[in-house]
Image (spheres, grey):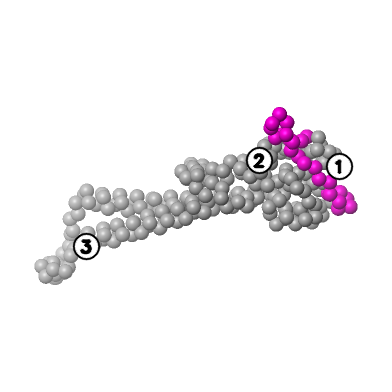
Amino acid sequence: MKNIELQNFLLNLTPNLWLITAFVLGVFISIMALLLAIFVYKDFIKFIQPNIDTNENVRFIKMAQILNTKIQTKIPIYRLTVYISAIILSLTVSLMGLLYIASVITLYTNASSHGMYQNNLSIKEIQDLIKVTPKESKLPSNLNNALIIYYKFGCPDCSAIYNDLTDKLKDKQVYWISVKSKTGIDLLNKYPTSEVPAGLYITNNSSGVIKSLSKTLNNQTVLDINNLNYLINLK
């Protein structure tokens, strides 16, 4: 199983949990399973070691030492099987918990690169939104003649036109900027817009031309191809 498949499998076990809740749950499970493994192991060691608290066993051990004889402890097979199985199971659960934590962190990191700013989204919501949200771009130092797309993670209109928009821009130099990121906030202060998704074209004299990229047609949100073409043709 590939890493991404394993991560999705683990995350899909708890699709409705918030990320912070999932992280805490993973830590709790890992720690408790590890403590259980340690407890079972210590109990196992006590079980297989001879009890030297009684005078009879002390004399037996001394006699064995005098005769240079190894002390053999007989352990019932079923008890040995129970101990080993419990230890292996506990360690496995602890390992799966650690992998679950890693999956949660990976999802958070990935979502953050796509512009996620919310802390109350479930794992399933985040996974779905990543599929219809671009990764935020790094802007060049010179923005003249740059075409920038304003978007917001979780914005219904942004998600609705994402596939059509990326298809139209697949051969174009374009920068995707989340309006909730530091870069986006700084850019909005200079080139403000009240709605997303929106396209921003920065001219040679650093002035900005902004157009909305979505519209409602037959009660559905669709790409405003005319506004997009207008911005593309400015380049």
Q: Could you say which is closer to the camera, residue 1 or residue 123?
A: 123
Bounds of the magenta segment: 202-225
Residue 170, horizontal then vertical, whole percent: 73, 38
Q: Could you say which is closer to the camera, residue 197 or residue 166?
A: 197
Tell me the distance, in whole angstroms, between the alpha carbons under discs 3 and 2.
65 Å
What's the residue type where badge 2 is placed?
A: Pro
- Side (left or right) of 125 relative to 223: left
Q: Which mark is residue 144?
A: none
Residue depicted at x 86% and y 53%: 206
What's the residue type where badge 3 is placed?
A: Gln
Image quadrant holding the C terminus, namely top right
Question: Furthest residue to the front?
Answer: 219
Instruction: Select label 1 or label 3 by which is in front.
Output: 1
* Residue 177 lies within the magenta run: no
Instruction: Residue under label 3, please give it.
Output: 49
Q: State whether residue 57 is above or below residue 214.
A: below
Residue depicted at x 54% and y 53%: 105
Asked if marks 1 and 3 touch (Cβ < 8 Å), the reply is: no
Tell me the distance, in whole angstroms, between the alpha carbons under discs 1 and 2.
27 Å
Q: Which mark is residue 234?
A: 1
Q: Could you say which is closer to the camera, residue 184 or residue 114?
A: 184
Label 2: which secondary element: helix
